[in-house]
Amino acid sequence: MNRNDKETLEWVEFVKANVVAHFDTGEVYWKIPLKGRRVFTPLGCLDTKGYVKMKINYVSTYGHRVVWILAHGYIPKMLDHINRNPSDNRLCNLREVSFSENALNSGDWSNNTSGIKGITIMSNGAYKVTKCGKHLGTFHKVWEAVNAYNKYS
């Protein structure tokens, strides 16, 4: 949200006053009927990455952020879906994290050819091992590559 602190606080108060969340399902609803609002009809729709996106008081936001605001009363810097399902906004599936903690819960990168974190299959069939940006070696057996990755700390 690119808003100043006063506007952000006003928006959070608007959310608390006008929106309700069911923490067991992660669904968000309007509390108060107004023109164009259906009370207790789930808000939002899925975006192209699978996140529930919604607009509240002219501000586009994500469903998991609204659920967190309603449960804890503030906007976190970063949230993580524990089970890595971006549409699962149940409160028990959300946790506040730092950027580095969030990166640890990411899946394999799209360019991962082996399906094993940190290990890439090269064109000659060898296994290249990298961890934390450091090249750890090239191996001809997958188990050697896995051992090298696990030994590096």
Image: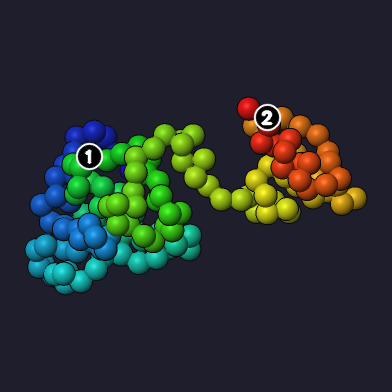
N-terminal-most mark, 2 or 1: 1
Indicate the position of residue 127 as horizontal and vertical percent values.
81, 45
Report the side of 84 relative to 128 (left or right). Answer: left
Read off the residue under disc 2.
152
Quadrant in the rendering for residue 6: top left
Up-down: is 11 above or below 25?
above
Indicate the position of residue 92 as horizontal and vertical percent values.
30, 52
| Residue 129 image label | none
Labels 2 and 1 touching (C-beta < 8 A): no
Indicate the position of residue 73 as horizontal and vertical percent values.
18, 41
Residue type at tag 2: Tyr
Residue type at tag 1: Tyr
Give me the residue at 40% from left, 51% from top. 81
Give me the residue at 76% from left, 45% from top. 143
Q: Nearer the viewer, residue 16 or 37?
A: 16
Q: Nearer the viewer, residue 62 or 148?
A: 148
Quadrant in the rendering for residue 87: bottom left
Where is the N terminus found, in terms of image quarters? top left
Indicate the position of residue 141 as horizontal and vertical percent values.
83, 47
| Rendering colour mode | rainbow
Separation (CA) of disc 2 from disc 1: 39 Å
Read off the residue under disc 1.
74
| SS at badge 1 | loop
Report the side of 34 relative to 125 (left or right). Answer: left
Where is the C terminus found, in terms of image quarters? top right
Quadrant in the rendering for residue 85: bottom left
Q: In this rendering, which labeled residue sits more in front, label 2 or label 1?
A: 2
Report the side of 109 relative to 127 (left or right). Answer: left
